[in-house]
Image: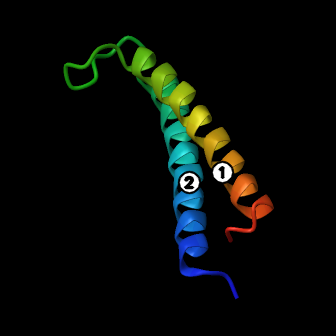
Amino acid sequence: MARPQGIGLAIVAFAVYIIGGIGTFAGVGLIILMKGRDLWGWGEGRAIGYLFVCAGLCLSILGVLLMRLFRNRGLS
């Protein structure tokens, strides 16, 4: 059975992966739906969408790398 620390690290890695996926698809939605419209005073919706896509992909990749690292090191 895995140690409690390993389970916690696995949950954190999986949460980072899920948040990255949600951010990626939210960014794609903003790019498609918010052409030329302002998004709550933050800027144009497409620009924010590109930011969400890039940040979401980075978080997804980080989540996968963390999951593999924790598994290969025997932490989960």
User: Against 35, is 65 above or below?
Assistant: below
Residues 68 and 31: in front is: 68
The amino acid type of the residue labelled 2 equals Ile
How is the structure coloured here? rainbow
Secondary element at tag 1: helix
Say which of 12 and 22 sits in front: 12
Provide residue 11's location: percent of width, then percent of height.
55, 66
Q: Which quadrant: the C terminus?
A: bottom right
Q: Is residue 76 left or right of residue 25?
A: right
Q: Residue at x 62, y 41 (%)?
A: 62
Residue at the spot of label 1:
66
Of marks 2 and 1, the one in the foreground: 1
Image position, residue 48 (x, y; %): 40, 21
Specify the label residue 29 is tagged with.
Answer: none
Q: Nearer the viewer, residue 36 or 64?
A: 64
Q: Amino acid at mark 1?
A: Leu
The single residue placed furthest to the bottom in the displayed view is 1
**Residue at the far right in the pictured view:** 72
- The residue to which callout 2 is attached is 18
Q: Position of residue 59 (x, y in %)?
A: 56, 39
Q: In terms of secondary structure, where does tag 2 sit? A: helix
Q: In the rendered structure, which disc, 2 or 1, sits on the residue that comes first in sequence?
A: 2
